[in-house]
Each structure stands twice: as C-alpha cells, then as structure tokens.
Amino acid sequence: MGIGQYYLATPKKDASIKNTDFDILSVEFDTKSTFVGQVFTADKQKQNIGFRKSISKSIEDYYKLYNSGKKVKVKIIVKDFTVTETLSNQNSISGNIKYEIEAYFENEEKSTKFCNSRNSAKYSRTLQASMLPNVEKQITETLDNGLKFIIGYIKNSKSNLEAFATDSKVTIKPFYAKPTIDTVYYQQRKVTWADFNGPVRNNHQYGAAIFTSFGFDSKLTVENNVIIAEITPKVYTDKNMSWAKPEIKTSYALSHEQLHFDICYLNTLRFLQKIKTFKEDTRDDLISRIQYEYLEFYRTTHKMQTQYDEETNHSLANAKQKEWEDKILLQIKQIDTQQIFD
C-alpha cells in the first residue's frame, strides 16, 4: 500500500505579528521536498504531510506576508524542519515538530549571519483525521515563533547591528608603548646605541642602520547605530634589526638615526589625521580603506627615509642634517594631536 499525502493549508498572516524593521528576501532549504514528515491516519497507516510547494518556497511565501518595503533584507536558511509522530497506544499519538533556522543580513556585497533559532513543539492527538488541522496549527505556530525570534532579536540588538547603522567613525586610542626586551616604542624614549643589537654589517659602506616601523591594532564594533573602528597605533624600532659599527657611535651619528625614528612618527601622525575623517557604510569597507591608506603611508615613509639619507649623505652633510632635523621636528610640532586622539 502506497503512502498517502496530506497537504497543509496555506498559513494566513497573523495580525498580532508586527515586523517594522526588515523584509524577508528569500528562504533556502537543502531539499526540494514538499513534505516535512509523516503522520498517522485513522487506520494507523502513515502518510506524508507537507506543502504543495517546496518547503523553502512555502515558508518564503508565508514570511513575505510580513514584508513592508524595508531597506534591510534578511535571508533565512532552514537547517531542519521535520514533523514526527509516535503511536503511543491504540488511539493516542505523540507528535514533535522541529524547526531550526539561521538568519542573514543580505546586501549586494555579502551575506552576514546574525542569529539562529531552534524551535521544538510537542503535541498529542488521537487517530481521528479531524485532528489533522490541529497539526497544521502547531506547524504554523512553529513558523510564527521562528519569525518572532528574528523580529525580537533585531528589536533588542538593533543599535548594535551593522545593517541598521546610520553613521561611522574612526577613533584613535593612545599609542601602544608597552616596554619589551627587543622593541623600543617611540613614546618611551629616544634611542640609544644600546638599542642597536643586530649583527654588524662590516662590509656595508655605512656605519649604522635603524629599523623603524609603524602599525596599528584595530577593533570594529557597532554602538548606538554607529560603526566604530577603534585604532591603536604604534611606532617602534626593532633592536635586533638595528645595527651600528663601534667606530661611528657618536652622539651626532645617533641623532641622525633618531631622526629616522622621528620621520616614522611624523608619517604615522599624518596617517592618523587622514583616517580620522573616514566614513563608510560597512565595517569591511571602513577597515579596508584604513588598511589601504596604511600601505600608502608606509610607502611614503620609506620614500622619505630614503630621501633623508640621500640628501644628508647618511649624516655626513652637516648642513643638510641640521636642515632636516629642523624641518621634521617643526612639522611634528605643527600637528595638533588633541584633534587626533580620543
């Protein structure tokens, strides 16, 4: 005897469910089946129960009843939707409905998961066929609970969800300057010859080289509908990559190396000045723009360092050395750091 089929009535919109924040764009499920499970008939036989359309299309059509032309679009992925029944005794049936979904914000560029929900509804009924509409009601309530969960989650988390952000900003924290054995951070102090611990390059035509660099740590959040990129910058020199020949360790030569450090610091301030003004619609766009600008300033810094060494002949041109020192220190002084740091 073949398995019979029972198709659920199309659910009607529940007027008590209010959705004012988003629209359902689509619903996906990894099976094209129209059936969600099997139920018992009056003669204790099992029959398929499901929708006339596919499960995903049926849920999508139902959820779209609550759409209201909102800008924010949500995709739902159904991970599980099953109805199972167990015949407990001669005339009593225990039923269970499982419904698991994941919700994603959708835009043209990406899909972002923001919540998931698992629902399980138990029911009991007799073998009478007239009880099947009650199963329909239970299934509809399960679907409603899934939608209500998403609505509630967004309502409670809206101010911290990127999809609802109305502004963005970059905040700059104080320079990172935690002392370490191998690193000198610019904010700690000026360099000394004791910081040049790298292997001496005796075959090199110049007497010393300082390794300076800058970088940043970032933290991306959404608070009060504002996307925030929190940037913690750092300017440092690596002791183990900086080196100096013993015969050139004079205060004058050290001041030349210190100015390399100052140039790195100057360009970091300029980098921070620029990114402070950035505005973007998403966290990804904001941090991508910051990272792009970082690479641009990194190249600019390297170019300036090379120009400094060429024009001063690696400190041998005294007048040029003084000129560069005056220029760089003045440019640092002219930057209003109070406008940069939060």
Image (cartoon, rainbow, N blue to C red):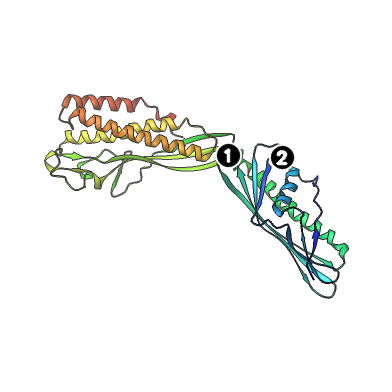
Residue 331, given in percent of the width and then of the height, sits at 32, 25
| Distance (Cα) linking label 1 and label 2 | 22 Å
Name the amino acid, label 1.
Answer: Glu
Three-letter code for the amino acid on which mark 2 is drawn: Thr
User: What residue is disc 2 on?
Assistant: 20
Left or right of 247: which side holds 194?
right
Name which residue lies at 24% across and 35% down: 258
Q: Is residue 18 visible?
A: no
Q: Looking at the picture, does residue 327 appear above or below residue 47?
A: above
Apparent side of residue 274 relative to residue 241 in the rendered image (left or right): right
Q: Residue furthest left?
A: 247
Seen at 72% across and 41% down, the residue is 67
Task: Decide: few, some or many residues near mark 1? Use Cα within 10 Å; few <14, some 14-19, many ≥20.
Answer: few
Do the residues bearing badges 1 and 2 touch, measured as CB atoms within 8 Å? no
Q: Image height check: is 250 above or below 104?
A: above
Q: Residues within 10 Å of mark 2 (few under 14, many from 20)?
A: few
Quarter that holds the N terminus: bottom right
Say which of marks 1 and 2 sits in front.
1
First along the sequence among labels 1 and 2: 2
List the residue tagged with mark 1: 108
Q: Is residue 157 visible?
A: yes
Q: Position of residue 260 (x, y in %)?
A: 26, 34
The residue shown at (47%, 36%) is 171
- Callout 2: SS: loop
Tell which of 80 and 6 is nearer to you.
Answer: 6
Measured from the top left, where is residue 101 in percent x and y?
66, 54
Q: Is residue 169 above or below residue 149?
A: above
- Compared with 98, 293 (above or below) is above
